[in-house]
Image: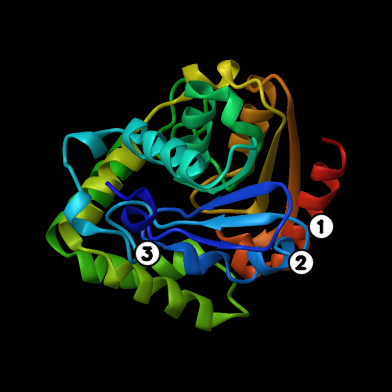
Amino acid sequence: MDVRKRNNVHVQGEGPPMVFVHGFGCDQAMWRLLAPHFAETYTCILLDLVGSGQSDLSAYDKQKYSSLHGYASDLCEVLAAVTTAPAICVGHSVSSMIGMLANIASPDQFLAQVMVGPSPCYINDGDYVGGFERSDIDSLLETLESNYLGWSSNMAPAIMGAPDQPELAVELTNSFCRTDPEIAKQFARVTFLSDHRADLPKLQAPTLVLQCSEDLIAPVAVGQYLQKQIPNCTLRIIENVGHCPHLSAPSASADAMEQFLRQL
């Protein structure tokens, strides 16, 4: 199989490789304010996860993608097809964990991890604050199952935040609504029920956790937890309301990333 076609891979710029992996309900267009900035000094690799954007939907395999490991395997294959040098992986939301799993499985392919709004587990568990009770997640998944388009139009503005930029919420709603509902339902289940806390200490690559000061999906407590659990981790909190700072606060996101990258 042509992995470039499968994941709708686009490459721009030249320099060390930097791969951008989008979150749930999104596609590579979500990096349009960040990737061109880094394409001046890096080879930026953009892709759509299978089942999202312009990926090859015929490649979607319910069993393979019943865990994040299926997506992580794809990421390693894309990098192998595009570059021989170790890449900086920039992952948003659930793709922070996809990037981490790929790195643990194939450490020679990665130089560093940038996690934008990451969460290893969305459900509160004892002292661990994930931001949601299990009943919240069950309710969210039930609503999504029964009325995906309605769920999308209600949830997208809350996820995006950025109340002073309402056009971004519209963009995210449209992105959700373009995704195949059956695939989106499974990906949501895999995303919100996954628990990768036990994998965090296995990640040896230098890691930047980029967290927003106010994020409905990934509260600051999650970023603080990641900083303690990942051996070589830097936490940067940027003043921003929402879960998508690469769209709503691209300059602050780029500045935090550049400061981290200078230390590699």
**Contact check, label 1 and label 3, Cβ < 8 Å:** no
Q: Where does label 2 land, which residue?
A: 251
> For the point 39% across and 54% down, which residue is it?
4
| Viewer-proximal residue among 55 and 118 | 55
* Helix, strand or loop under label 2: helix
**Contact check, label 2 and label 1, Cβ < 8 Å:** yes
Q: Where does label 1 land, which residue?
A: 255
* Helix, strand or loop under label 3: helix
Q: Nearer the viewer, mark 1 or mark 3?
A: 1
* Above/below status of 166 relative to 146: below
In percent of width and height, residue 96 lies at 53, 41
**Distance between the alpha carbons at the discs numbered 2 and 1:** 6 Å
User: What's the residue type where badge 3 is placed?
Assistant: Met
Q: Could you tell whether 144 is left or right of 71 in the image?
A: left
**Distance between the alpha carbons at the discs numbered 1 and 3:** 28 Å
Q: Say if residue 136 shows up in the picture.
A: yes
User: What's the residue type where badge 1 is placed?
Assistant: Asp
Q: Where does label 3 land, which residue?
A: 155
User: What's the residue type where badge 2 is placed?
Assistant: Ser
Q: Nearer the viewer, mark 3 or mark 2?
A: 2
In percent of width and height, residue 66 lies at 23, 35
* Total numbered circles: 3
